[in-house]
Amino acid sequence: MTSEKALSRLLGSKNYRDLCPDTVRREFEKQLTRQPDAARAEKAARERLHALSLAFMTPGEIKAARACLAAYAEGDEGALLRALMLHASTRERLSTYTELYARLKEECGDIQSVFDAACGINPLLLGSLGFSDVLGWDINGAAVSLVNDWAAAAGWRVRAQCKDVTLSLPPERFALALAMKLLPVLETNEKGSAMALLRGIDARLFLVTFPTRSLCGRAGGMEKSYSAWFEAALTDEFVLRSRFLCGSELCYIVEKAH
Ligand SMILES: C[S@@+](CC[C@H](N)C(=O)[O-])C[C@H]1O[C@@H](n2cnc3c(N)ncnc32)[C@H](O)[C@@H]1O
């Protein structure tokens, strides 16, 4: 099979066709440099793309969340929580998000604009909590559409775009940027990309969070190792304002020292 054919098969495949095409292309080309056989490179790219995105929300879960949106539009307010259960990251945050965002508002004051990098469906939480002027980017285009359709139904000033934060960043300045449970995903895929992201985003304050349990629920020293890595990676460009645990999420608020 030629590499063009393998790439177009990957771009059009049922599970991967909603992912950002630039990301799919990059992962395939990266695999091709390691593995000249196009079919094997395609298989390896599928595995990487699964780890980057689909492991957190599958196409089946998107479909179920769409049914929740239909129920929400008919007046079923509980449908929002049911939808938030369908992305692994918001599911893990469901019993603690009130506390987390109350603390964020307390520490950061009046937050005018928010960039949620690799947002998943977290902007639904932000909209429901009254955050306005929220922009989220994620490579999962189906999650992005769900966020936009839900925000339109609810009348929130929340929008999302299907974009890869390692390939470009929004040009505008934000009061606050969120990098929630994201840095380990980026750093595992490309060394150096996590801190490059924080340096690249034009924002004064950042909420950076880490999981302290794996997707299958194991702890295995994650809090200790992510703390050590992140605190060592923070250079003079960033001032650490606070560190706290919220449920199973390790949270940092950092300020960019301009
Ligand atoms: C662990 S989840 C975190 C989701 C969200 N930040 C939260 O905490 O609720 C990782 C998310 O990053 C997205 N993602 C992975 N790599 C990305 C990239 N390079 N650019 C944008 N989104 C990315 C995935 O699709 C997935 O939704």
Image: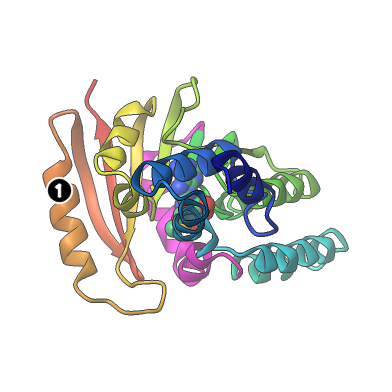
Q: Is 194 situated above or below 146? A: above
Q: Is 145 situated above or below 46? A: above
- Judged from the image, the secondary structure of the residue bearing numbered disc 1 is helix
Location of residue 13 in the rendering, given as x and y in whole percent from the top left corner = 68, 54
Image point (41%, 35%), residue name = 166
Examine the image and state in which quarter residue 103 appears: bottom left
Q: Which residue lies furthest to the front in this view?
A: 1
Residue to which mark 1 is pinned = 231
Say which of 98 and 238 sits in front: 238
Q: Residue furthest right?
A: 74
Say which of 165 and 7 sits in front: 7
Image point (68%, 51%), residue name = 142
Image point (34%, 39%), residue name = 206
Q: Is residue 29 visible?
A: yes
Q: Is residue 77 visible?
A: no
Prevailing SS of the magenta stretch = helix
Q: Residues within 10 Å of mark 1 (few under 14, many from 20)?
A: few
Say which of 129 and 45 sits in front: 45
Location of residue 219 in the rendering, given as x and y in whole percent from the top left corner = 27, 76
Give the magenta-colored segment's residue range.
86-113
Q: Quick check: is 257 in the magenta stretch?
A: no
Location of residue 137 in the rendering, given as x and y in whole percent from the top left corner = 54, 40
- Viewed as shown, does residue 152 lie left or right of 91? right
- Viewed as shown, does residue 224 lie left or right of 34? left
Location of residue 67 in the rendering, given as x and y in whole percent from the top left corner = 80, 66
Q: Quick check: is 101 in the magenta stretch?
A: yes
Image quarter hosting the C terminus: top left
- Viewed as shown, does residue 115 lie left or right of 233? right
The colour scheme of the drawn protein is: rainbow
